[in-house]
Image (tube, grey):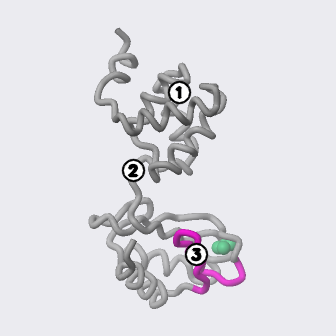
Amino acid sequence: MAADEAYTDQGEDPEVAGTVRALCADFDNRPDALIEILHGVQAAFGFVPEAAVGALAKSLNLSRADVHGVISFYHDFAREKPGRHVLKLCRAESCQANGSNALAAHAESALGVPFGATTGDGEFTLKAVYCLGNCALGPSVLVGETLHARVDAAKFDDLVAGLRGAKG
Ligand code: FES
């Protein structure tokens, strides 16, 4: 038995496997639809769980390496469960000209995590993004669907405090 086969039947998560099978069926189990299906998996779980890899490989008749390769090539796909709030801080040029480097350093220090990581309490994930289309009003920070403009350290702290207090 190949290592690939050995993995796929071990520790299958029924919820993940069921969701993956349904998403793959929507695309007639076409391997060329892998990216669209991965977006569906991420929409369902907030990230691409490891358990999805084996289920995708099985349904689409791909190797786990094929699936892993696509997930790691596209940075849009998260491999770990994100925090309750994802703070996307723009680090592109125009925002840098308006002070986003100082804001980035403050954000890492205030949250106690580097970019790409989630706070220990699972509340916040800090992510770098490159342009949110709000260049004239940077530094820009996107939280969920809400874009925050001209964010400085004080505004960032207020934002985080407000989110910590928010329910749901
Ligand atoms: S450079 Fe930051 S929003 Fe465009």
Select label 3 or label 1 by which is in front. Answer: 3
Select label 2 or label 3 by which is in front. Answer: 3
First in sequence: mark 2 or mark 3? 2
Mark 1, Cα crowd under 10 Å, few <14 / some 14-19 / many 20+, is: some
The percent coordinates of residue 92 (x first, y second) are 63, 69
Q: What amino acid does circle 1 point to?
A: Asp
Task: Determine whether 153 is above or below 119 in the image.
Answer: below
Task: Determine whether 132 is above or below 33 in the image.
Answer: below
Task: Determine whether 162 is above or below 64 in the image.
Answer: below
Mark 2, Cα crowd under 10 Å, few <14 / some 14-19 / many 20+, is: few
- Residue marked by disc 2: 80
Part of the protein shown in magenta: 135-150
Numbered label attached to residue 146:
3
Query: Residue at coordinates 44% horizontally, 66% vertically from top-left?
Result: 126
Q: What amino acid does circle 2 point to?
A: Glu
Q: Distance between the Cα atoms at labels 2 and 3?
A: 23 Å
Query: Residue at coordinates 49% horizontally, 64% vertically from top-left?
Result: 127
The percent coordinates of residue 23 (x first, y second) are 55, 36
Query: Residue at coordinates 38% horizontally, 35% vertically from top-left?
Result: 51
The kind of secondary structure element at disc 3 is strand
Q: What amino acid does circle 3 point to?
A: Thr
Residue 113 image-quadrant placement: bottom left
Quadrant of the picture in which ligand 1 is shown: bottom right
First in sequence: mark 3 or mark 1? 1
Numbered label attached to residue 66:
1
Query: Split into 4 quadrants, where in the image is the N terminus?
Result: top left
The reply to whether the magenta stretch includes residue 126 is no
